[in-house]
Amino acid sequence: MLRRLKIGGRVNLLIAVPLLAFIAFAAIGYIALLRSSVRGDEYKALKQAQDLRADVLPPPASLLEAWATVNHIAVLAAATDGFSADNLSLIEGDFETISRAQAKFEASMDYWGRQGLDQRVDIRLVQIGGAAGTRFFEVVENELKPAVAAEDVQQIIDVVRSMEWRFDLQQTGVNRAVVFAQNAVLVGEQSTDTYVGNVILLAGSGAAAILLLTLLLSVFVRRSIVGPIRSLAARAKTVATSELPDVVQHIHELAPDAPVPHLATFEIGTRDELADLAASFGSVQDAAVDLAAEQAMARRVMSENLINIARRNQNLLGRTLGFISTLEQGERDPESLDNLFRLDHLTTRMRRNAQSLLVLAGAEPTRLWAPPVALGDVVRAALSEVEHYGQVELAVLGDIGVQGAVASEIAHLLAELLENATSFSPPNTAVTVVGRAVPDGHQLAIFDYGLGMSADDLADANRRLNQVSSFDRESNKMLGFQVVARLAARHQVKVMLTTTPGGTGVTAIVRLPKAILEVVGAAGRAPTPVVDVSTMTQRLSEPLPGANGATPLALHTTSTTTGDDGMSLAPAWAPVAPAVGEGSDAHAPALMSLASQISAPASQPQATSPDGLSKRVPGAQLPDLGTPQNDATPMRAPDEVRSTLTSLQRGIDLGRNHNRES
């Protein structure tokens, strides 16, 4: 019932009940005090009983006074000078005293005659005692006074003696009346005591009842207010910490035409101000959901705009690359051709940035059927989109192909990792790419010996690489990781960063799942290392440059173990004797053993100029006609791979544009 009242009404009730009880208690106390006061009924009843007892005493007192006065008259009369002037004057005064006593006696008898006395008391006190007293005063008037007037001493003595039994008779009735009056006083006193005790008991019980009622009412009022408040607070906390973020996240992942989810309303089961507060909370959460939906719509519109801009840029860049390729084919001047190569490379990097914008904007890839692309060609396509591609050295990558529909995005993913590796590596160090087959797919490792990352930065980077999240303040510093994370999540690719052996640099491990891999046939394009493996092995065996004298590394072909996430944990580049003061495992990263997969390739002509730019090698694209081509094919230059994939991308873009126009 209390829940139906407003909080103000409950508080008023909590105040009014004790106040009314206090007023009632004060009224009861006032009435009790009034009845016990001199104007009260209880006091009057007690006073009447006391007066009754007092009134019982006047008859014998007045009669006793009259009897004493009569005896005094007898003594005066019996004296030698009994009837002298002085004695007569005294006797006259005694008669006046007897007259006053007679008046008191008659008034007392008249009062007792009107009382509802016990029959025996009435007979003794009023009838017999009253008659005896009346006869006593009649004897005084009729016999004693004449004897005094006659100055007859003997007559006076005889009259006085005859009056004694009448006094005794009246005294017996008086004693009975005294007992009755005393009982009445006791009853009155007991009644007054009982009344006062009852009043005190009632007052104490009332005070205790008021206190108990106030406490119970306080508890009920508190529960009726605190309970809904706690329920409301718990519900608000659940909404703020769990439900609302989940709904917002769900809204961000909704399809454009999907209905917007809503949160459950706040229900606390009251009709008071807390119900209004709950309704206000519901309005706030609905407004938050609507705002999240509007933000998702605005983000979706912005993403669509960015996608359109990125596709237009891609189209223009594709046309630019086609035009540059045409110029390259007709150019014979080495210097101009080198400039065209530079322009071609910059344009390709711009196209990668446009593709990154598409990935970040959430554009879904167009699933087109295409033949598989050798992994080596995919890596070389990634190299063509890296600024410092001259620092990258390819070891054995593995005889495997990537599905043509996802080859460009895998190349994009590798390009982001290679760009990061070359950007944070000294120009005089190499970035090495090694690959090998694993039970659940194929694994690539990108080694660099640059600045490296702290343990906290590595943990944060790995978290970002394995979690596709919305942008935050730190996202602008790791846009490449955002692109890699989205591409990896799209194709179930696992990417992990760890410290390069020796404590300097970072190694990126990329695990390609079997779902996107295809076996390249005999006529396929198997990858061929660009670098001399023996030279690379010798370089890796030498001490790595570092500010603190990093541990030198040597190439070992040791067995590996596998961690919980499927990544190989044993280092392929095991440290040689550590420096003094360093532990042998101080900087050992979690790497896979790829060294055993490296084999010495045939010598290849140098494909880069001394300043790090690519250059055409005569005959590099021609097959060796004197050697049967069964398991190995000549190296394909990055420019050739880039040109091929550019043509493929240009065809895809033209197809998209044609579909939109139609």
Image (cartoon, rainbow, N blue to C red):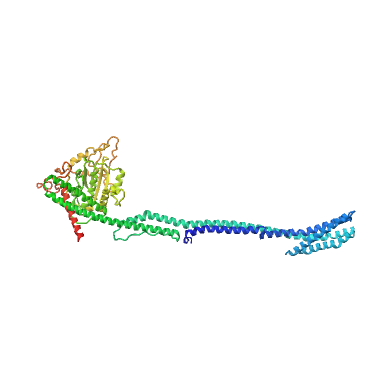
Residue 611: percent from left, percent from top: 17, 41
Relative height, residue 13 to residue 626 (above, below)? below
Q: Is residue 14 left or right of residue 146?
A: left
Q: Taking the image as drawn, is residue 371 in sight? A: no
Of the pair 130 and 623, the residue shown nearer to us? 130
Q: Is residue 60 visible?
A: yes
Tell me which residue sits at (29%, 59%) in the image: 256
Q: Is residue 383 above or below residue 41?
A: above
Point out the image quarter for the C terminus.
Answer: bottom left
**Residue 510 relative to residue 239: left or right:** left
On screen, residue 223 versus residue 492, left or right, reads right
Q: Is residue 101 above or below residue 584?
A: below
Dividing the picture into quarters, in which one does residue 576 lie? top left
Residue drawn at point x = 70 percent, y = 60 percent? 48
Location of residue 447 (image quadrant): top left
Rendering coords of residue 191 (x, y %): 67, 59
- Measured from the top left, where is residue 467 in percent x and y? 29, 51
Count of all numbered marks drawn on residues in the image = 0
- Camera-nearest residue between 152 and 551: 152
Image quadrant where residue 303 sits: bottom left
Q: Position of residue 600 (x, y in %)?
A: 17, 43
Q: Residue furthest top?
A: 580
Residue extending farthest to the left is: 626
